[in-house]
Amino acid sequence: MFGDTAYLESLYNNRAAIPNFQDYVDRWTDNSSGICRSLKDQCERDLPYGDDLLETMDVYTPSAPPSAMLMFVHGGYWRSLDKSQHAFVARPFVDRGVAVAVINYSLCPQISMQKLVLQVMSAGAYLYRNANDFKVPKKRLFVAGHSAGGHLAAMALSCEWPNFSKGLPKKIFQSGFSISGLYDLRILTKISSINKDLRMSDTDAAMLSPALMSSPQGARLSIAVGGKELGGFKDQHRLIAQSWSSSIGLDVPCPMDNHFSILETFADPNSELFGAAMQMFE
């Protein structure tokens, strides 16, 4: 059964499982447009962190000097969506004194998965090196992501930063939060509808799988998955909880959420999930 493409699709194809998924994306886009307008005096848009046109970020800052900065990485199976649709995530954190950098990265298949991961690491390095410009202490950087962004957040915690770029410390992000993330990418190479864009070999997938890496030292990853998510994402959640057991922070139950609604729950200041995210900064 593991090799049955239709079965694997049923485990990982969120858009097929949630017919109204576009309603969520449209709502994110509309809400983000409104927040961009309301925070226009507290936002620096399209800051470049690399040479590629999509290596940019939008940084939202509170009116007072921020207590911390969160780098947020959007999802979309590494091949779709944009930072402009995710500004809504920043608002509740900014309201509580945390700056938020919502980043873009180039998308597959225009770029390889390896290069995409390196772009996200470049964004982290940029924030570390320029933290003072945002009035953020260098030791107060954190990372979070949703779905594919959850994978990239975990990769940022795993990164060997001094090997990535000279002059960087062993740890850039103090801790992270992954919402409905993917951690063992090997199974995705068996799903043609996904891997036709990602173009990963088995070797690529193994190299880019946080669940196959040593858990990060001195940093904790909190995790969440929706109770109404597909089985594949629940499997991925269990994998990282087991393989990184010594580095897992909070494991937040979200029994009523699907793969898309959980991101709205993350950005809901009254939710348990948002409260758990705020604990990162304590």
Image (cartoon, rainbow, N blue to C red):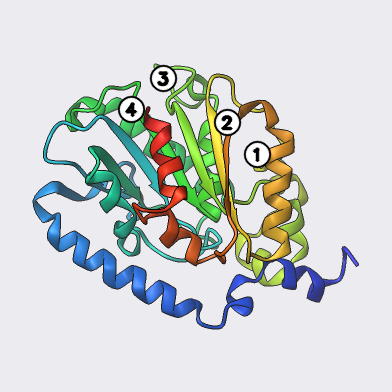
Q: Are marks 3 and 2 in contact (CB under 8 Å)?
A: no
Measure the alpha-carbon separation of dots 3 and 4: 8 Å
Q: Secondary structure at mark 1?
A: helix
Viewer-side residue, 91 vs 134: 91
Q: Position of residue 223 (x, y in %)?
A: 57, 43
Viewer-side residue, 256 vs 208: 256
Quadrant position of the C terminus in the picture: top left
Q: Are marks 2 and 1 in contact (CB under 8 Å)?
A: yes
Mark 4: few/some/many CA within 10 Å (<14, 14-19, 20+): many
Say which label, 1 or 4, has the lower sequence index.
4
Report which residue position mark 2 lands on.
158
Residue at 73% x, 63% y is 231
Residue at 49% x, 27% y is 164
Report which residue position mark 3 lands on.
168
Measure the alpha-carbon separation of dots 1 and 4: 22 Å
**Which amino acid is tagged 1?**
Pro
Measure the alpha-carbon separation of dots 3 and 2: 14 Å
Q: Secondary structure at mark 2?
A: helix
Q: Secondary structure at mark 4?
A: helix
Report which residue position mark 1 lands on.
210
Quadrant in the rendering for residue 85: bottom left
Say which label, 2 or 1, has the lower sequence index.
2
**Which amino acid is tagged 2?**
Ser
Q: Position of residue 196 (x, y in %)?
A: 66, 68
Report which residue position mark 4 lands on.
128
Quadrant in the rendering for residue 22: bottom left
Measure the alpha-carbon separation of dots 4 and 2: 16 Å
Mark 1: few/some/many CA within 10 Å (<14, 14-19, 20+): many
